[in-house]
């Protein structure tokens, strides 16, 4: 809707400029001809209630151009006088063009853009030292895990948890998982989306405070690509306590948070 209104505002500027600079048959500017008396009048216009603000903004931008050619520092302005009401202070001879412009903006068809829907998968993965088979549930991430082995040495990986969230543009999406008192939260917010890349704010929190702990970051994610979002020392399967530390002899070497972002079909 903003794009359409701004395009219509271009027409508004042209109309107002003609009104402010038009001749009276003698080639002179009727506004600038008398630098001491610009005939500014106040007029109330009715606009669609749900588009009051956007039309006010478009007309205000057009009036800035008109004000630039007014003599004596006079300024043409527009304010909201209530839902569906705009009050315009401008030269009397420009009010007709202003009225036509406002009417045109009010009648313009607004293109409804469907919300963009995005799915985000989070994987919490533990890497154990030494050679071994990866968890079959991680088959789709094989390429990313192979790259990690090249830099970190022999490791085999086990899936600790997976979380999937779906959200639309301008919405926050959250998921909290619990294993007894052990809670984790996964959150994301969609920013801008351009072509096959999405700008997102991603958050993760492990309430126990071990392993990955807490993360809050912004990323530019290519749809369908696996991203190692964070890496931390490994953590025991259960929260550490004074009695459980000794019972965790196979503590993983590393814990990873991997994410993949997918563009989904728009909501019906």
Image (tube, helix red, strand yellow):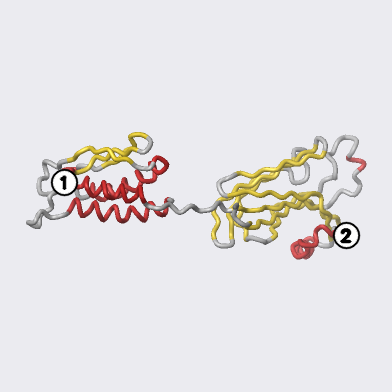
Residue lying furthest left: 26
Relative to 185, is 122 above or below? below
Q: Is residue 67 left or right of residue 6?
A: left
Q: Nearer the viewer, mark 1 or mark 2?
A: 1
- Residue 31, percent across and down? 14, 48
Q: Is residue 233 left or right of residue 221?
A: right
Mark 2 is surrounded, within 10 Å at the Cα level, by few (under 14), some (14 to 19) or many (20 or more) other residues, namely few
Element under disc 1? helix
Residue ID for mark 2: 130
Could you say which quadrant of the image residue 150 lies in? Answer: bottom right
- Residue 166, percent across and down? 66, 49
- Residue 180, percent across and down? 83, 36
Where residue 141 is drawn, which disc sits there? none
Q: Is residue 183 left or right of residue 93?
A: right
> Image point 27% across, 38% down: which residue?
44
Element under disc 2? loop
Could you say which quadrant of the image residue 147 lies in? Answer: bottom right
Residue ID for mark 1: 71
Q: Nearer the viewer, residue 262 or 145?
A: 262
């Amino acid at each position: 809707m903003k794009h359409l209104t701004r395009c219509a505002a271009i027409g508004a500027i042209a109309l107002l400029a003609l009104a402010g600079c038009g001749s009276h048959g003698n080639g002179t500017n009727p506004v600038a001809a008398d630098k001491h008396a610009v005939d500014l009048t106040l007029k109330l216009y009715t606009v669609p209630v749900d588009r009051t603000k956007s039309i006010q903004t478009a007309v205000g931008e057009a009036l800035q151009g008109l004000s630039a050619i007014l003599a004596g520092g006079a300024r043409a302005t527009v304010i909201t006088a209530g839902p569906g009401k705009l009050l315009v202070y401008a030269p009397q001879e420009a009010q007709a063009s202003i009225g036509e412009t406002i009417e045109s903006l009010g009648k313009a068809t607004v293109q409804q853009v469907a919300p963009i829907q995005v799915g985000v998968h989070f994987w919490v993965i533990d890497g154990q030292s030494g050679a071994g088979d990866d968890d079959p549930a991680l088959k789709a991430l094989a390429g990313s895990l192979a790259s990690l082995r090249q830099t970190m040495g022999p490791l085999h990986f086990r899936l600790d948890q997976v979380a999937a969230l779906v959200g639309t543009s301008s919405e926050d999406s959250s998921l909290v998982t619990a294993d007894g008192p052990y809670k984790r939260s996964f959150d994301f917010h969609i920013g801008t989306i351009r072509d096959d890349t999405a700008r997102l704010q991603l958050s993760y929190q492990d309430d126990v405070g071990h392993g990955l702990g807490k993360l809050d970051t912004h990323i530019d994610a290519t749809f369908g690509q696996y991203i190692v979002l964070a890496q931390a020392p490994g953590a025991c399967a259960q929260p550490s306590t004074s009695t459980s530390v000794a019972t965790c002899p196979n503590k993983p070497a590393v814990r990873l948070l991997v994410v993949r972002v997918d563009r989904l079909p728009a909501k019906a």
